[in-house]
Image (cartoon, coloured by chain):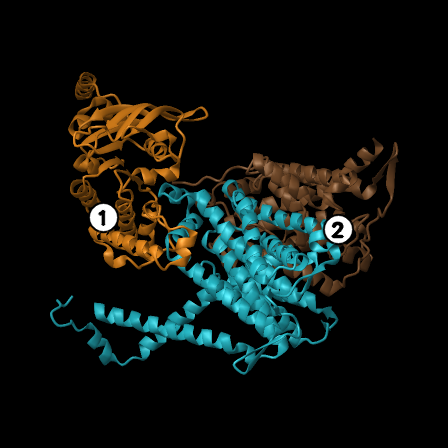
Chain colours: A orange, B cyan, C brown
């Protein structure tokens, strides 16, 4: 990467997803700059998770293009994303319950390792060296998240809050250039939310990762995001900084669902006062 | 608990496990001298079957691909051995690995079906594989001897063969036909188990387990589903091929009827009874499932008990065993073992005098008390 | 031409029996995701029950059949309540293995109890037949088709128009949601097994009719119904019926017309070959639906 490389991490043009006659979203356009923390928000059912699933190649787009550091993203198979530097977390946690925390994180490093059935089975020699090196890297990721002591615990024995952090550790261990976070604070208590928000900030600040966040907790997003895109009923309603978006009328309407006409309100209030 | 105490506990556990392993190895090596011919030949069958079971353990236990087609791959291995060793008179050093390789190739061909098909759909296609295989075995006498079956060659290395009546003297100890097969199979089983042990703690084994648990997240994390599933099929069929070849060679005569769905089910039962997703599970399970007929026959020496043919009693016992097992301990023998081990630890912990517990929580010099 | 019609008719009748096996299986699977490998074994029990009641007592045939149906339905429900309820929540393969275990027990217990020799079914039709234009239409087979049609019509009415039919569809679609709105899920499970048992009794009765007879090898015949289940799609009752009939017709037609280079008794595996070919094109069967994974 040359020092003056300003290719956007993501360039989304006219992206659409349709299931038969139902449109999940369409006419979606936005850029995510390198190193940016970009959020996609909107009410439930707005199409955020569908957008996410298209970007992580779980669903095939119906129309439009996506460029990832200049590459055509929509050509990649789902399992090639990791190798391209894209890490994704799951709202319902994509962890493997019967495996240990360390093993879960190590699966994140699958694309960075190369041992096949022969080398893995033989163990002695390059297999062992590679395994040891990557275990160390995985532990590092766990330490960054502050959960190294859970390395050997089985995921199914851990509480939700810790599992969320394992998911983040795994994303970090993938050595990504772009991280897709799917509703990172969904279903969390106030304390947990604060913890995860801080972790997201740290990941962004200390590791300089480009992050795309999908969330419907306004508070969390306004705290960490640099730019925000608002979706409603599958259409882009606004794009801008958190402050800009918060003031945008269309956004308010989307969340509250009604017209805010100051003149009409004043009249109604006067009418009520007269009675 | 302080870090030292934790690692001391872990150290105890590792030491305990190593001692247990050593005892098992010694026991396995000495076993033939403690058994009569009947039980030794049963042991041979168990060990040979365990090789195939370990293979199925990779496919179904680790990679989660349901397969009732194991009998097909066993047959492929057996008939490869028959053609190369029996028709062409090649040494076992060639036909044994060849049996594995040919079966493995079949696995590579069948494997991609697991990419399109899931769960029960895949299971029933594998059942179809067994039936189609039997149809082929019945109709191609050149390979299988037709419905009447054919003879299979004994293991032969150079001029020495393991045939019935053969003996080998090693340092004053006489090893007979059964013993020869026993040690050969034991060696191969040990290699297979070592291979799987290494597999499951490295990249490939983890990828398989991820695929078993949740395919989509696994794919998004970078696991190539196709390669992982096909690898699992190849490894599993390779081991099945070797196992099938040894089985037929030891039996010395096999009819195509034997490569049946029931045989596949026995293997599946073995890995589940033993414990899915473990290295020892398939071996323990094989011990139960494949020794059962011999145990029952020795309990009821007549061909029938109370007018009921022994085969039917064996089958009923299988069925009941499977049912009871899965209702009581779905994690198999390994799960039972760890449950017992946990119980033992609990009892041990209660019996320890209070003083040592206080000692364990003392901070170590220089360390902060937590 | 007459040979074709003859074989087609026989295949259609056989297909009806497969359809009954497939239907019983699908009912259970839709309601509870349980894969009942013992469905074929249940048919075997059904055949023997009819035989025992029809030949061992002085009861009229119809009553004997009714008794067999009731007993088998009750037995199926008991199995579900005594054994399967204890393993609710376990992974699927545990339940599958239990039903496999049950089928092994049944296949061995039948000859153990009744001996390996064929019995008399005790049906009023025997080998009597209607002869139409050179085609022999055995009464047993005609009745098989008629009864299957009646059962299917009855099931359709139940499924669409009755409260419990709706309850079953709700449970099949989303068990948790159904329970949350007050659907008696446990009763629905029990009901699905009862239906499967009753349908198996009918299937067993006709399976054991001319030219077969109640004998232990009937269990193997029922195994050939599995391609029918898959062909139609695991979760579709309509698929079960279509699949069953297609498999039956194909099996009998191949027995008549298959070239000799395909090997002797190719018709035994024709159902599986057909199933594999169809799955290449439609991995979830003709009418099956792809399971949704929520991310």
Question: Disc 1 marks which residue?
Answer: A192
Residue occupying the point 13% across, 68% down: B367
**Residue that extends furthest to the bottom in the rendered view of this protein:** B172
The circle drawn on residue C65 is 2
Secondary structure beneath label 2: helix
Q: Quadrant of the C terminus of chain C?
A: top left
Residue B2 at what x, y percent from top left?
21, 69
Up/down of A117 relative to A268, above or below: below
Of marks 2 and 1, the one in the foreground: 1
Residue occupying the point 80% across, 57% down: C119
User: Which quarter of the figure has residue B178?
Assistant: bottom right
Mark 1 surroundings: few (<14), some (14-19) or many (≥20) residues within 10 A:
some
* Label 2: chain letter: C
Q: In this view, does C104 lie to the left or right of C171?
A: right
Foreground pick, A46 / C160:
A46
Query: Are discs 2 and 1 located on one and the same chain?
Result: no
Q: Quadrant of the N terminus of chain C?
A: top right
């Amino acid at each position: 990467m040359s020092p003056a490389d300003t290719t956007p991490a993501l360039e989304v043009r006219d992206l659409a997803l349709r299931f038969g006659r139902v449109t999940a979203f369409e006419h979606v356009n936005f850029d995510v700059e390198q190193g940016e923390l970009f959020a996609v928000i909107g009410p439930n059912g707005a199409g955020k998770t569908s957008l996410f699933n298209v970007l992580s190649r779980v669903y095939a787009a119906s129309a439009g293009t996506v460029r990832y550091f200049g590459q055509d993203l929509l050509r990649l198979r789902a399992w090639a994303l990791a190798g391209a530097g894209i890490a994704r977390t799951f709202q319902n946690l994509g962890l493997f319950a019967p495996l240990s925390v360390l093993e879960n994180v190590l699966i994140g490093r699958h694309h960075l390792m190369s041992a096949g059935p022969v080398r893995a089975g033989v163990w002695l020699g390059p297999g062992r060296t590679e395994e040891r090196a990557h275990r160390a890297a995985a532990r590092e990721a766990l330490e960054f998240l502050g959960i190294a002591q859970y390395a050997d615990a089985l995921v199914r024995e851990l509480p939700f809050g810790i599992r969320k952090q394992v998911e983040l550790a795994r994303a970090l261990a993938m050595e990504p250039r772009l991280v897709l976070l799917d509703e990172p604070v969904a279903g969390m208590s106030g304390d947990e939310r604060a913890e995860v928000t801080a972790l997201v900030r740290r990941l962004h600040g200390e590791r300089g990762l480009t992050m795309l966040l999908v969330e419907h907790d306004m508070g969390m997003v306004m705290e960490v995001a640099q730019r925000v895109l608002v979706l409603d009923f599958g259409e882009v309603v606004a794009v801008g900084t958190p402050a800009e978006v918060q003031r945008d009328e269309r956004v308010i309407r989307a969340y509250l669902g009604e017209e805010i006409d100051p003149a009409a309100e004043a009249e109604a209030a006067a009418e009520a006062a007269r009675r | 608990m302080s870090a030292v105490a934790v690692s001391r506990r872990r150290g105890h556990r590792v030491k305990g496990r190593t001692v247990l392993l050593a005892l098992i190895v010694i026991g396995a090596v000495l076993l033939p001298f403690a058994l009569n011919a009947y039980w030794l030949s049963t042991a041979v069958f168990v060990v040979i079957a365990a090789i195939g079971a370990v293979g199925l353990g990779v496919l179904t236990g680790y990679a989660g691909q349901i397969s009732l087609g194991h009998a097909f791959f066993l047959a492929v291995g057996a008939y490869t051995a028959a053609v190369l060793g029996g028709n062409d008179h090649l040494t076992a050093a060639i036909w044994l690995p060849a049996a594995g390789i040919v079966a493995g190739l079949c696995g590579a061909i069948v494997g991609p079906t697991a990419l399109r098909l899931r769960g029960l759909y895949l299971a029933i296609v594998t059942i179809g594989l067994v039936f189609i295989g039997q149809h082929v075995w019945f109709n191609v006498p050149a390979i299988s001897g037709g419905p009447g079956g054919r003879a299979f060659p004994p293991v032969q290395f150079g001029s020495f063969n393991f045939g019935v009546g053969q003996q080998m003297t090693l340092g004053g100890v006489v090893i007979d036909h059964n013993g020869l097969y026993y040690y050969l199979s034991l060696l191969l089983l040990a290699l297979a188990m070592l291979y799987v042990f290494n597999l499951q703690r490295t990249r490939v084994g983890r990828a398989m387990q991820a695929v078993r648990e949740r395919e989509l997240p696994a794919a998004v994390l970078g696991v190539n589903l196709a390669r992982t599933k096909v690898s699992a099929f190849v490894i599993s069929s390779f081991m099945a091929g070797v196992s099938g070849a040894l089985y037929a060679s030891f039996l010395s005569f096999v009819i195509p009827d034997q490569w049946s769905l029931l045989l596949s089910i026995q293997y599946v039962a073995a890995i589940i009874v033993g414990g899915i997703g473990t290295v020892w599970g398939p071996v323990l399970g094989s011990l139960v499932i494949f020794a059962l007929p011999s145990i029952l026959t020795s309990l009821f020496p007549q061909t029938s008990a109370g007018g009921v043919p022994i085969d039917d009693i064996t089958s009923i016992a299988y069925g009941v065993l499977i049912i009871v097992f899965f209702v009581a301990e779905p994690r198999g023998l390994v799960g039972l073992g760890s449950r017992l081990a946990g119980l033992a630890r609990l009892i041990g912990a209660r019996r320890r005098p209070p003083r040592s517990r206080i000692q364990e929580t003392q901070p170590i010099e220089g360390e902060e008390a937590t | 031409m007459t040979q074709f019609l003859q074989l087609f008719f026989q295949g259609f009748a056989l297909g009806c029996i497969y359809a009954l096996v497939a239907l019983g299986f699908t009912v259970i699977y839709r309601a509870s995701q349980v894969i009942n490998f013992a469905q074929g074994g249940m048919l075997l029990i059904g055949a023997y029950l009819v035989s025992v009641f029809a030949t061992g007592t002085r009861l009229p045939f119809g009553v004997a059949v009714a008794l067999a149906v009731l007993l088998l339905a009750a037995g199926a429900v008991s199995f579900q309540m005594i054994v399967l309820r204890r393993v609710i929540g376990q992974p699927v393969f545990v339940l599958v293995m239990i039903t496999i275990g049950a089928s092994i027990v049944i296949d061995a217990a039948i000859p153990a109890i009744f001996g390996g020799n064929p019995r008399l079914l005790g049906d009023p039709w025997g080998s009597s037949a209607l002869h139409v234009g050179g085609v022999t239409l055995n009464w047993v087979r005609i009745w098989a088709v008629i009864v299957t049609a009646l059962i299917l019509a009855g099931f359709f009415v139940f499924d669409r128009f009755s409260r419990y039919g709706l309850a079953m569809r709700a449970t099949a679609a989303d068990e948790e949601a159904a329970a949350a709105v007050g659907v008696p899920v446990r009763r629905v499970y029990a009901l699905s097994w009862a239906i499967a048992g009753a349908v198996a009794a009918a299937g067993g009765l006709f399976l054991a009719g001319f030219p077969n007879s109640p004998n232990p090898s009937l269990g193997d015949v029922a195994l050939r119904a599995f391609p029918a289940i898959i062909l139609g799609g695991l979760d579709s009752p309509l698929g079960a019926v279509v699949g069953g009939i297609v498999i039956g017709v194909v099996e009998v037609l191949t027995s008549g017309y298959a070239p000799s280079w395909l090997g002797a008794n190719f018709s035994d595996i024709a159902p599986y070959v057909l199933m594999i070919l169809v799955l290449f094109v439609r991995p979830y069967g003709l009418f099956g639906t792809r399971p949704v994974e929520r991310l």
